[in-house]
Image: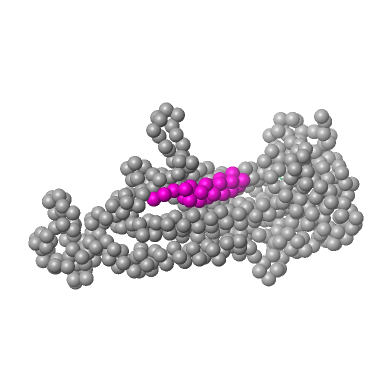
Amino acid sequence: MKTKMPIARSGRFTGEPRAEVAQFTESVSYDWRLWRQDIAGSIAHAKMLEKVGLLQHDECDSIVNGLEEIAREIGAGNFPWKPELEDVHMNIEAELTRRVPAGAKLHTGRSRNDQVALDMRLWLREEMLALGEETQSLQAALVDLGTRYAGVLMPGYTHLQRAQPVYFAHHLLAYVEMFARDQERLGDAFKRVNICPLGSGALAGSTLPLDREWAAKLLGFVDAKGRARVSRNSMDAVSDRDFVIEFSGIAALLAVHLSRLAEDLALWATTEFNYIKIDEAFTTGSSLMPHKKNPDVAELARGKAGRVIGNLMALLVLLKGLPMTYNRDLQEDKERLFDTMDTVRATSRIMASMLRHSTLNAPVCGAAAADPVLLATDLADYLVRKGMPFRQAHHVVGAVVALTEKLGKPLNQLSLAEYKSIDETFGADVLDVFHLEQAMAQRQLTGAPSPRGVRQQLAGWEKRLKDRKGKPVFSVS
Ligand code: ARG
């Protein structure tokens, strides 16, 4: 069926683009998902045009009604998207104009260049809030799991070598902090997303008396005092994609955090570690080896960080050589942005769900944490308390550890004489160092894993997360 000539070609062109060109340049196959934002933006623009006298009341009414009707059809899956109309903007406008004559006035003082920038900002605003909420549910899942096993110790690692005992909850709370920073970054970037480009036209504004501030307010682009937030430079407004890149950078870091958490879970689920059991529903089998139960969800969460990081690189490279102002290259931003958002949102959700379906093998963790050698640093601190310089204490304890290896007994089984054979400073109280509970209780510094400190952190996070429930994760003005 022959459709109407693409509206952006109208008068100047004598024919339609070659089919292969239309196919190469179309974006509606993916930017259709901006339809809600496109319609909301068009309704606000139409109302503003009426307000400044560029549309009659009944014209505005028919445009708004027409757009709302189209929205219902798109929502119901009944809208005939046409690739020859290039993108979401022209599909909707062409259909509106076909139904409503006044539709031909909708694009007054507007270009697809400010329109697409507006749609992306509107879309990102909603999605960033949804992502923020999902990362908050993930934090809640971490806090719940930590609380469930609040008393369980495990070895903390450096260089993937057992280092010092920590509470399992302390390890999980480290991720809660990372996600809290991700949320802060989202909130900060949101301020720069929340700026209205409408009225910037193709690149140089408009000669018509548009009311940019009024339209911006209608679309919720306001500061804490309710003042309109509009872009200050029309050229910048249509060519800037900083807000997309900034979000993608934040998302890349979030993806890295998710990936590290996934790696910890996958590692802990190995036979070698055997610290956690991931519910069967979150694992898959092998097509060949009948006994396998693989942590594919965790592995994919780790793997997906690759594409999110790649998307950030793609966007940076996309922008780097562009002359001012709008260039069609910019259309390539959408798939990268959508993919990044979809990926980090889905990964946050599935990770929360997987944590809620994981159980800790507390006896194995406890046994691993009980190795007295993990308190070698405490032993050095013991000598420091007796007045020995730390460097010397480090050396002495090293020699004690070497002796335990030679004698084949653990640190807490050496006799006082054996301790004294290394250094006379050791006293009868030396074995008290290896009382694990006491050792943990001594880690009282802010941020350190004393049992009280960890419980306070868990309780603090639980309260914070409960108080925040139902509220935006970050301030939206
Ligand atoms: N589909 C286009 C994009 O996403 C919309 C803007 C088109 N503007 C233009 N002058 N061709 O970038």
- Which image quadrant for residue 439? bottom left
> Residue visible at 90% across and 55% down?
58
**Residue nearer the viewer, 163 or 368:** 368
Q: Locate the N terminus and report the quarter of the image it occupies.
A: top right
Asked if residue 174 lies in the magenta stretch, the reply is: no
Measured as percent of width and height from the top left, residue 20 is found at 71, 30
**Residue nearer the viewer, 109 or 449:** 449
> Residue visible at 86% across and 59% down?
50
Residue 246 in view, yes or no: no
Measured as percent of width and height from the top left, residue 428 is found at 14, 67
Q: Is residue 379 above or below residue 126?
A: below
Asked if residue 349 lies in the magenta stretch, the reply is: yes
Residue 237 in view, yes or no: yes
> Residue visible at 83% across and 45% down?
96
In this picture the colour scheme is one colour
Please give left or right for residue 163 compared with residue 394 in the image. Answer: right
Secondary structure of the magenta portion, mostly?
helix
**Residue nearer the viewer, 232 or 73:** 73
Please give left or right for residue 360 compared with residue 256 in the image. Answer: left
Q: Is residue 334 above or below residue 449?
A: above
Measured as percent of width and height from the top left, residue 228 is found at 72, 65
> Residue visible at 20% across and 65% down?
432
Q: Locate the C terminus and report the quarter of the image it occupies.
A: bottom right
Magenta residues? 336-360
